Image (cartoon, rainbow, N blue to C red):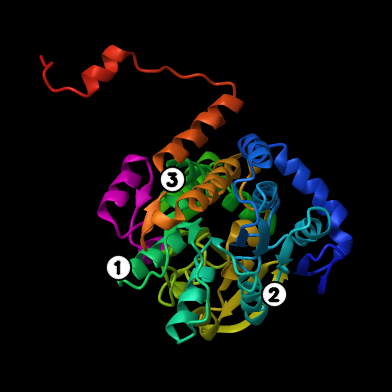
Amino acid sequence: MQSNVTNSNVQFDIKNEGLKTAGKKRIEWALGRMPVLTLIKERFAKEKPLNNISVGACLHVTTESAGLMIALKAAGANVSICASNPLSTQDDVAASLVFDYGINVFAIRGEDNESYYNHIQQVLDTDPKITLDDGADVIATIHKSYSEGNRSITLPWASTEETTTGVIRLKALEKENRLLYPIIAVNDAQTKHLFDNRYGTGQSSLDGIIRATNKLIAGTTFVVCGYGWCSRGIAQKASGLGANVIVTEVDPFKALEAVMDGFRVMPMVEASKLGDIIISATGDINVIDTHHFPLMKDGVLLANSGHFNVEINLEGLKGLSLEVREVRPLVDEYTLKNSKKKINVLGEGRLVNLACAEGHPAEVMDLSFANQALSCEYISKNHSSLEKKVYTVPVSIDEAVATLKLKVMGIGIDTLTEEQKKYLSSWQIGT
């Protein structure tokens, strides 16, 4: 662990400065595959829309989020970042952000809960006017402190939220009329959840499983818990690799959609008996629970792709087990007491795509972080008129991101003629 202040007054708590060279190479590789964010960064560097504004981020510290931090600094912001998951930090990236880009970083891969929340507090100590969250831990920390009587906190102007789990938490706060400041739900942008959640989570979750286990996916029975956008992507990618995919659901509409997409659908208690690989991506707790474990095949692989490590009941599994041992890096084998069956849990039950791999590809995070960057600019210009509620990303920003992405891909699309616009806005013309 290395905690200090550099000569340029950059604050940090990272693993090792010596990793910075490798980190910079990887950041540069990712930036070369994020052309939309690069275009935004170039405009930001000229216009400085965030000049002298403190921005605090709680995101996975990866090569892709590094690109976002660099873009925000180019906009003139004073930028700080901590991790949004104890196993998602890439330590070489953290080192490079500090020593090559002058950004405050408080993140170490494998940090315990105490360090995790200390790092969140270090970001909050920079008095951010705009916060960026992935899972809502920064926002929750502020709200808990405020509700416990700490009225000395200077509330941010507004925050963005990156992921489904965080949006669920924040809408619960809003419903209880306890939301203290405005939130922009970046996750709900079409250029985020339609692409990042489906294509990003789909590919990176399979990548994490394969890296951790070297398991052949073809021919396996692959159970996907849930059929939201993330789970759809996982199911599609697993099917594409030759797996026989089963989906479990609680929502009749999503269950029906999974059937129509060609997957078997059944209750979890039945799917537990059949799965060679079982992965949850629902955002809910104990999706894979104690009554499922004894039903599972000997040697089954369990993974989680939801934001928090609550989807697999690990305490319950431990209570049913004789012993737990690490059989491969980031693969823990639980031996059940009664049957002696072996159940393998990947990445400590945390986000398998980041615990066991590198997270989403840069090409898809280009869209998500372009939304983040433009939402920060929007907050800086409009925060005084925003209410204490959860907003969707403005359509103008969402469309701008999609348009830029098509442009850099060299793809053109049609536009409506005046006659067509008139037709679509009228009711008089019929059969």
Locate residue 427: give its quadrant. Answer: top left
Q: In which quarter of the image is the C terminus?
A: top left
Q: Residue 343 in the image: x percent, y percent?
A: 57, 71
Three-letter code, disc 3: Ala
- For mark 1, what is the residue? 175
User: Is residue 267 magenta-colored?
Assistant: yes
Ranked by sequence position, the earlier of labels 1 and 3 is: 1
Q: Is mark 1 on a helix, strand or loop?
A: helix
Q: Is mark 3 on a helix, strand or loop?
A: loop
- Answer with mark 3 or mark 2, whichever residue precedes in sequence: 2
Q: Look at mark 2 in the image and give the residue it sits on.
A: 111
At x 36% / y 70%, what residue is drawn? Answer: 173
Q: Does the magenta stretch include residue 18?
A: no
Q: Distance between the residues labelled 1 and 3?
A: 21 Å
Mark 2 is on which residue type? Answer: Glu
Q: Of discs 3 and 2, which sits in the foreground?
A: 3
Residue interval drawn in magenta: 248-271
- Which mark is in front, 1 or 2? 1
Kind of residue at disc 1: Lys
